[in-house]
Image (spheres, rainbow, N blue to C red):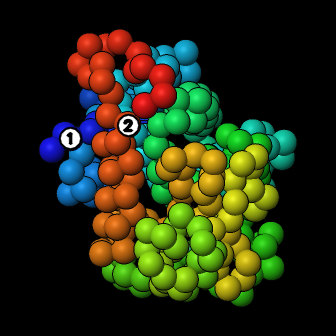
Amino acid sequence: MTQPTIGLTSRTMPLRATRKQRPTETVTRTYIEAVEYAGALCVLLPNTDPERAEAYLDRIDGLLLTGGDDPDPILFGEEPHPQIDMVDARRDHFEIALIHGARRRGMPIFGICRGVQILNVALGGDIYQDIPSQADSHIQHTQQRLDDGPWHMVEIAENSMLEGILGTRELRVNSFHHQGCRRPGEGLTVCAVAADGVPEALEDPAQKFCLGVQWHAELSGADGEKLFAAFVESARNSFRTASNSGEPPASGR
Ligand code: MN
């Protein structure tokens, strides 16, 4: 069976004061394990000039937007909230270029945690910079369990792609975020919400596979495996005929 190639966005670890600590592009191993378990291969997409986004997209079959720092609020026209955490504008701009390019190609996109937030911001949506102080929430979204196990419930929208993949309308998910999607971007619909009304997943019904979840599906056992399997299957179906040639993929696949 063909093994599609998934591009994983990365986190740039900053320059430190010592001579041996240079900026480093990193991907948390659990994402790699989840993609490989689903039958695909992984390549790291380094945070680089957005002008290189198209050339990187030529070489992958699916785009995985991994977790990480908070999106820069200037991207949705806001000043930084007092509770905002680290931002990396360089990563934001590269990922936004990847998202637009992948959508133009109909390439499968799967966003996790920060990934669903940057997907939303890229399409003109906005986010709560800090759920506890902005969302009038009665839910703790920064889970207080010692393990990565499920924490709060989400309600999944009827007839959504997410429901189709998971086969349920209710799911208990892990939660490691202080920010969250607010107004959905163009083309996106909210396909899962927490009990406080904060969106927990967004999808684009007009795309073959464009889904983002606020929880860490790579740490979610069988439910997460279903999501990665569906993502990789979609990437397999759009496997590049020009594989390894370095040529842009033909249209309409
Ligand atoms: Mn949550």
Q: Quadrant of residue 191?
A: bottom right
Quadrant occupied by the C terminus: top left
Residue pictured at 78% horizontal, 73% vertical: 135
Q: Earlier in the sequence, mark 1 or mark 2?
A: 1
Residue at far front of view: 252
Q: What residue type is labelled 2?
A: Ser
> Which residue occupies the foreground of this view, 74 or 161?
161
Q: Is residue 234 above or below residue 7?
A: below
* Residue on which the image places disc 2: 238
* Residue positioned 39% across, 63% down in the render: 227
Figure quadrant of the N terminus: top left
Residue at x 38% of width, y 48% of height: 234
In which image quadrant can residue 20 be found?
Answer: top left
Out of 165 and 132, give the one closest to the viewer: 165
Amino acid beneath label 1: Gln
**Residue 155 at x, y percent in the picture:** 60, 82
Q: In this view, does 97 lie above or below 36?
A: above
Pinpoint residue 46: horizontal percent, then vertical percent.
40, 29
Can you name the residue that lies furthest to the left here?
1
Count of labels in the image: 2
Q: Is residue 199 above or below residue 204?
A: below
Say whether residue 232 is left or right of residue 175: left
Identify the residue under disc 1: 3
Mark 2, secondary structure of its residue: loop
Q: Which is more toward the observer, 194 or 128?
A: 194
| Residue 201 against residue 114 in the figure, above or below | below
- Residue 95 visible at all: no
Residue 12 placement, left or right of 192: left
Rendering coords of residue 63 (x, y %) = 43, 40
* Mark 1 → mark 2, Cα distance in angstroms: 11 Å
